[in-house]
Amino acid sequence: MEKGKEEAHSPEAGIAAENVFWKELGRRFSDLVARLVSAVIVVVVVLILLWWGELPFSLGMALLSLVGINELFQALHSRGFRPAVIPSLVAGGALPLIAYYFLERDDGFAWLTLVISLYIPLLSFWCLVRRNRKRVAEDLGVSLLGVVMVGFCLSHFVLMLGLDSEKPWTVPFSVIALVWVFDAVAYLTGTAFGKRKIVPSISPGKTWEGTLSAAALTLIAAYLLHLLLNREWLSIGAAMSLGVLVCVLAFLGDLFESSLKRELGIKDMGSLIPGHGGVMDRFDSMLMTAAVSYYFFRFLVFRL
């Protein structure tokens, strides 16, 4: 017994423990660097698309939709689900382009619902006529999930371009910027100081310390956007309301995907973005936020 205690407190054991500590610290630092570099590249690409114009930004959203739906479907397929890939990719990729085409019209969002309305019977027919149609309801459900959660939601970033006619980029930029602030602060502070977990059974990495810090910094960022953008529609009240919306919806979107990944038994949806995983892993908190924020702006801020 004493021999075991001596071994546990021996210099060799201490050195081994110290080596493990430094290796783990180095791994975390490497992950953090990869994550930050990838995040900066993604931010720069999105900003370039916004600066370039409405069509490039819309094409970028269509590409994101295609990649995101494909990642989701590959993950689902690996666990035995059979989403209808071809009609879903067509519908998901078309939605941002439809939003762009009807950007100048007041009823642009209605055309998105038309696409979904046409997609549902096409999807039903597709699932009924293909082979091995043992779980039609399941196939319909996961296919619709991909198109609505990714293509439909992302297309609302395109619709936002039609709200401010003088500076169209400012509306989607305000939402994207606040989501990125929330995500970045939640990750950094949660990793550094997080101890009390919110929902450990779904997402062990989400802590109260990280989430509350992110919420506080997001509201500060919303106030700074109010000052810097200097747009009439982004009053202090609208900015703070948007900040609250982002905090709630970005957290919910991230938590939903964590739950989905846990159910599927995977760590990441893809591997396209180093340090983050795939497009779905990086933009999960954007999806619900984009859709709800558009209707918040349209009906409560711009009152269209």
Image: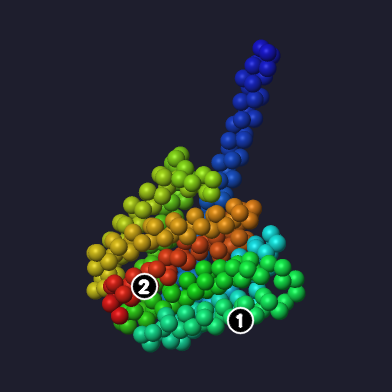
Q: Looking at the image, which is closer to me, 172 or 78?
A: 78
The residue furthest top is: 2
Label 2 neighbour load within 10 Å: few <14, some 14-19, many 20+: some
Residue at screen point 41% across, 50% down? 211
Mark number displayed over residue 295? 2
Instruction: Judge from the rendering whether residue 196 lies leftward or rightward of residue 62; answer left or right.
Output: left
* Residue 224 can be seen, yes or no: no
Label 1 neighbour load within 10 Å: few <14, some 14-19, many 20+: some
Q: Secondary structure at mark 1?
A: helix
Specify the amino acid type for callout 2. Tyr
- Image quarter of residue 237: bottom left
Q: Looking at the image, which is closer to me, 277 or 263?
A: 263
Q: Looking at the image, which is closer to me, 166 or 27?
A: 166
Specify the amino acid type for callout 1. Leu
Instruction: Judge from the rendering whether residue 302 lies leftward or rightward of residue 256; answer left or right.
Output: left
Name which of mark 1 and mark 2 comes first in the sequence: 1
Mark number displayed over residue 122? 1
Q: Looking at the image, which is closer to me, 238 or 174?
A: 238
From the top left corner, tell me how far across and down residue 282 is, in percent: 52, 61
Mark 1–mark 2 distance (CA, rounded to whole Å): 27 Å
